[in-house]
């Protein structure tokens, strides 16, 4: 029996079972945001697998299914559970949907997220056996997997070989992924060359592609070249979005605060709404320049500007507040972290804990340690215990900061 026949035979046998399961399975009660939040705070790989298997039993949208799969693979990869990733992905080859190119593309991409590009390549090469057609869709998934695996030279090689071998043309997404490979490899000048090639071939250039090159140029220190590209982009009628503006704001954050403020005002005047990332750069700039009162005003005004603080916001604020011995306000920001279910790395939290314990409040330092024990991976427990002992917090009474935070939401 050929491998191609065997794969298709397994799928036929599974069709009725899968169909019946889909009919009998009730709709899932967990939203995408709830799953993400729950997975973010779960550090046991076995429980991550259980969550994935539970969600997979239900009839969910393809978009949600892809999100669940990607999140699960990332968490398993972080725990170096590559064999589990392989088992999950290979089991999907018996799903009747495997004859759909979009479905196979999710497998290719997920392997790439785990840095398992050899597996991505193998799935791509098996598509004929699986009964799935190859087009630019699965090709783009392969390039994306290659980028995630940081095999930038391989992206260029595949770009030259695969379209010709399988009879399709690269599209704007393909070119965008190639440009990203050049830029991530520190060669934005090659990305600029591809922009010219795209224009010559009549392939649409997107603002995202321009933004990718701008980011690489600023990162490389080629500020003048980046500004020239910005002028070229806007001169050709491209309308920069928040992502494009944020690249310029990012470059300005190491300088004067008024320059960052000016750029954010420029965004508003252009009809582009600054987002949390924009304000994070402004907060960071204020903090680096010792302007903590101004940083606090921006932080407190985030919701009024239609934004929410994210992990980077909390991390920046807590780091600089502790550095400036503003421990009480740092504790307040930490409570916001708890409400938002976003916990900074302990190396950021530790100076705040030490400052509170040695200064204003051992009780509050203990509250932070207590919350950290609930939300950090098991391998952090010894570190937390050691800090607790060194600061004399063992036996110190404290309230449950997480319970208190949930009551105020």
Image (cartoon, helix red, strand yellow):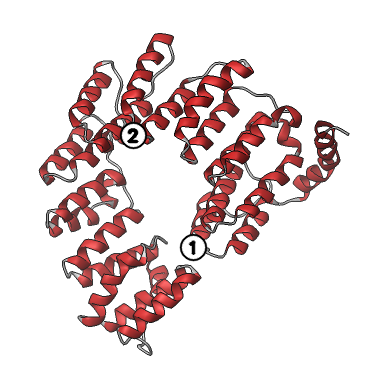
Residue 115 image point, x, y percent: 53, 45
Quadrant of the rendered structure where residue 6 is?
A: top right
Relative image position of residue 273 (x, y in whole percent)? 28, 37
Q: Is residue 97 depicted above or below 401 in this figure?
A: above
Total marks shown come to 2
| Residue hosting label 1 | 41
Residue 216: image quadrant is: top left
Secondary element under disc 2, as helix, strand or loop, is: loop
Q: Which residue is mark 2?
A: 186
Residue 397 horizontal side relative to residue 56, left or right = left
What label does residue 238 carry, if any? none
Q: Which residue is pictured at 78% across the width and 50% down the height?
A: 24
Does the image show residue 243?
yes
Residue at 59% in and 56% down: 81
Name which residue lies at 61% across and 22% down.
Answer: 135
**Mark 1 Cα shell of 10 Å, populated few (<14), some (14-19), many (≥20):** some
The quarter in which the N terminus is drawn is top right
Q: Are marks 1 and 2 in contact (CB under 8 Å)?
A: no
For mark 1, give the secondary structure.
loop
**Can see residue 309?**
no
Indicate which label's residue lies in the foreground, 1 or 2: 2
202 or 85: nearer the viewer: 85
Q: Quadrant of residue 187?
A: top left
**Residue at horizontal 61 percent and vertical 63 percent from the top:** 47
In three-dimensional space, the C-alpha distance between marks 1 and 2, rounded to whole angstroms, equals 34 Å
């Amino acid at each position: 029996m050929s491998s191609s026949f065997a794969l298709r035979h397994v799928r036929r046998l599974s069709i009725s079972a899968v169909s019946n399961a889909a009919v009998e399975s009730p709709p899932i009660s967990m939203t995408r945001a709830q799953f993400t939040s729950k997975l973010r705070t779960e550090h046991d790989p076995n429980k991550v697998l259980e969550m994935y298997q539970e969600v997979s039993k239900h009839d969910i949208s393809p978009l949600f299914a892809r999100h669940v799969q990607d999140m699960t693979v990332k968490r398993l990869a972080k725990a170096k559970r590559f064999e589990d990733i392989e088992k999950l992905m290979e089991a999907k080859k018996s799903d009747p949907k495997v004859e759909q190119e979009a479905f196979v593309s999710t497998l290719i991409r997920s392997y790439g997220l785990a840095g398992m590009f050899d597996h991505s390549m193998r799935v791509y090469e098996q598509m004929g056996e699986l009964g799935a057609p190859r087009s630019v869709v699965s090709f783009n998934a392969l390039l994306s997997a290659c980028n995630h695996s940081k095999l930038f030279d391989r992206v260029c090689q595949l770009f030259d070989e695969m379209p010709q071998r399988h009879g399709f043309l690269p599209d704007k997404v393909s070119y965008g992924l190639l440009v990203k490979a050049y830029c991530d490899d520190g060669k934005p000048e090659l990305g600029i060359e591809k922009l010219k090639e795209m224009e010559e071939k009549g392939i649409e250039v997107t603002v995202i592609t321009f933004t990718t090159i701008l980011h690489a140029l600023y990162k490389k220190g080629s500020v003048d070249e980046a500004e020239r590209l910005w002028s070229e982009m806007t001169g050709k009628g491209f309308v920069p979005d928040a992502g494009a503006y944020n690249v310029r704001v990012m470059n300005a954050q190491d300088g004067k605060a008024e320059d960052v403020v000016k750029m954010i005002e420029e965004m508003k005047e252009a009809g582009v709404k600054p987002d949390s990332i924009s304000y994070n750069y402004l907060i960071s700039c204020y903090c680096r320049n010792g302007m903590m009162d101004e940083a606090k005003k921006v932080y407190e005004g985030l919701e009024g500007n239609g934004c929410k603080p994210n992990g980077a916001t909390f991390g920046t604020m807590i780091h600089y507040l502790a550095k400036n011995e503003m421990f009480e306000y740092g504790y307040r920001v930490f409570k916001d972290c708890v409400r938002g279910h976003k916990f900074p790395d302990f190396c950021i939290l530790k100076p705040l804990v030490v400052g509170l314990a040695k200064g204003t409040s051992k009780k509050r330092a203990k509250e932070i340690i207590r919350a950290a024990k609930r939300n950090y991976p098991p391998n952090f427990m010894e570190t937390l215990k050691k800090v607790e002992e060194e600061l004399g917090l063992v036996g110190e009474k404290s309230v449950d900061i997480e319970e208190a935070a949930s009551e105020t939401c």
